[in-house]
Amino acid sequence: MKPSNILCLGLLLGFVGSNTMIENASAEPQVIGQYNPSLSLAPLVEKMSPVVVYIEVNGMNSFGRDTQMGQGSGFLISNDGYILTNHHVVQGSSSVEVRLSSEKTYKGTVVGIDDSLDIAVVKINAKGLPYAKLGKSSDIRVGDWVVAIGNPFGLSHSVTSGIISAKNRALGSGPYDDYLQTDASINPGNSGGPLFNLKGEVVGINTAIDARAQGIGFSVPIDSVQKVLKDLKTKGHASRGWLGIGVGSRGDQVTVGDVYPNTPAKKYGLRKGDIIISIDGKKIDVGEELIRIIGKYRAYDKIAIKVLRNGKQKTLNIVLGERPLEQDLESGMFLQEDIPDALGIQVSVISGFDRRAPNRIGLVVLQVKNKGLAAKKLRAGDVIIRANNAEIQSPNDLSSLIEKKEITLDVIRNGKRKTIKIR
């Protein structure tokens, strides 16, 4: 399945919500027991509908005015106003309005996002609210009944039902793809809404559909969400484990590609070309599995990686770092490294995702300090591709030239090559 066929379910230009007074809502009990779909789902729906919310998002238009961007769904997870939804529902918002099933309206604040899972936590200032119990998506089976409640096309609190069609679906949307697939009808505007099991527990967050099909929808499993929920509330982002390597392959073996500077992999001795056998005893067969496994650990957890190096097995005990934000991974900001004070610049290594240098080799200048030999010579955004007629592939290549009387840099600036001499 190509990612281009997968659509997020946020609905642009949904209808405008009413301007009701902001008040507290009364609490309602959580669902107890299990419902029988052969009789009626009405008892489950009646109990769980109050936890589902309508989210309207506003943003700034080109004239600097607040204008409606779209709408989506969400659900309450605590009696003091914490709400789970999709990141793409609230992304880029200048203001968020949350409307309950009672029609009471609240101003929402985005307190945490995880763009890797496409989830967000929104907070409203209220007490005594009904809220959903989070279940275990690992316990649900293919064929089990599920119920979706949301706001497709602005149709508030629409209910559909179906079964779990498949588990562990990868859609190519991110490093932690592990979706539940369901045939419960979900549509644009359902984004961020809950997928319930028959106990009234949330097992997934409805997120995407296949644009080519009917009855094929995807939900983020709630187990993945629960692992980062505390981080989102307290830190604003997920604190996942991070090695700092590029992942390669050699036949059916997973290998270490690049080892990035200032990372746990570099610090604890992983080397380019190492074959990764296992992590904490779990065998690694494919690169995607390695990324998912590391992401299940928290930052600063200690792991044991067994590698094959030059025909010999070796075990490295590594304390993980914290995975950078996806935007920093895409831009290369995680590779930033200071050059000694004499030059006074901060750089990052050009990687495969940056086409600003021929053959993608060089250093991009992130910052030029006022005090330093490079002040007024280099600019942020310059790409250093050669120094003293030698290719530059790492900050160390440049640092080794600091003692020279003169450094001649070949730089790409705004697409043009320049020669800059620093004495």
Image: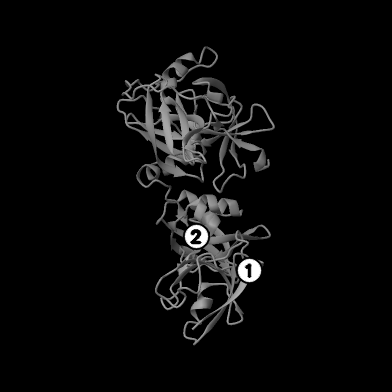
| Quadrant showing the N terminus | top right
State which quadrant residue 226 falls in. Answer: top left
Q: Which residue is mark 2?
A: 333
Kindly give the residue lying farthest to the top in the view shown. 39
Q: Nearer the viewer, residue 51 or 372?
A: 372
Neighbour tally class for label 1: few under 14, some 14-19, many 20 plus, Cα within 10 Å: few
Query: Identity of the amino acid at label 2?
Result: Met
Task: Find the residue positioned furthest to the front.
Answer: 63
Using the rendered image of the protein, determine whether residue 145 is visible from the camera's viewpoint: no
Name the element at disc 2.
helix
Q: Residue 185 at what x, y percent from top left?
A: 59, 24
What residue sits right under mark 1 in the picture?
416
Q: Tell me residue 363's x, y (percent).
A: 55, 69
Image x and y of residue 403, in percent = 47, 85
Which label belongs to residue 40? none
Who's the residue at 47% across and 55% down the image?
A: 324
Q: Residue at x 50, y 36 (%)?
A: 89
Residue drawn at x 33%, y 29% as measured from the top left:
79
In the figure, 176 relative to 163: above or below? below
Frontmost residue, 124 versus 115: 124
Q: Quadrant of residue 300?
A: bottom left
Give the CA distance from mark 1 to mark 2.
23 Å
User: Could you say which is closer to the camera, residue 96 or residue 338?
Assistant: 96
